[in-house]
Amino acid sequence: MEPLAWYRLLIPLAACIGLAVLAVVRPIPRFRFAVMGLGYLVGYAILQDQVSARLCPEYFTVFHPPIRGLTDPTLLGIAWGFLGAWWGGAAMGYAAGLAATLGHWPRLAPRDLVRPMLVVIVLVGIATGLTGLTVDRHAEMLDVTISPGAAADIPLERQRGLLVVSCYHFVAYASAVIASVGLCVWVTWERKRRSHRRES
């Protein structure tokens, strides 16, 4: 597989820096929500990928375009945690910001979503952890093996780790999307509740 082009690292980094600057220079709440979401999800993804890079570093070096000069598991986890989550975190935060500010109900401030966003991260972590444990246990019970073609570049002792990491990464993405939708629904409900409380 061809190494990852440098622009695919630099463009996301520049976009995140630009978003953070924009949130400071133009204090539009939706940008602040986007930065919050980005921070939460990237922070979680970096922690998750510290585990992934130790269970099977080849998940990032063989099954993803390799990053030139990057083989240390800690750095792999940081790089791929950022690359895999920055856009989803920004989208989650911005969507929550829209839900928190559009319409006539009382608006929510970014500080109102600190705990709800933390709940999203905890739920994603629980779903991911349970998936990893379940897949590992069942792969051992059923003596699951990876096809020789897919496993050619993976040491035997890390092949089950590749299966576990692949499965829980899928669940992490899926649960993050579902939990983000749930976050927006909660924000809308909370604004409606505050509106009724204010009227009564």
Image (cartoon, rainbow, N blue to C red):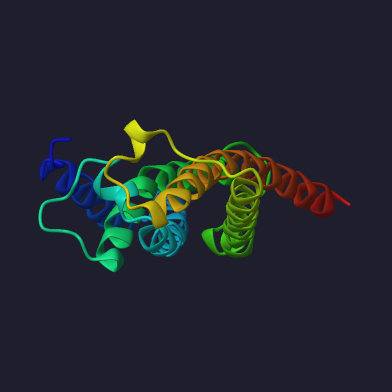
Q: Residue at x 26, y 43 (%)?
A: 62
x and y percentages locating residue 182 in the rendered image = 67, 42
Q: How many marks?
A: 0
x and y percentages locating residue 16 in the rendered image = 27, 52
Closer to the camera in the image, 143 or 85: 143
Residue 5 visible in the displayed image: yes
Does 61 sit above or below residue 77? above
In which quadrant will I find the N terminus? top left
88 to the left or right of 72 = right
Q: Residue at x 70, y 47 (%)?
A: 191
x and y percentages locating residue 129 in the rendered image = 60, 57
Does 119 sit above or below residue 61? below
Does 49 sit above or below residue 14? below
Does 199 sit above or below residue 114? above
Residue 24 visible in the displayed image: no
Closer to the camera in the image, 29 or 43: 43
x and y percentages locating residue 78 in the rendered image = 31, 61
Q: Residue at x 61, y 36 (%)?
A: 103
Q: Tell me the quarter of the picture where residue 88 sits.
A: top left
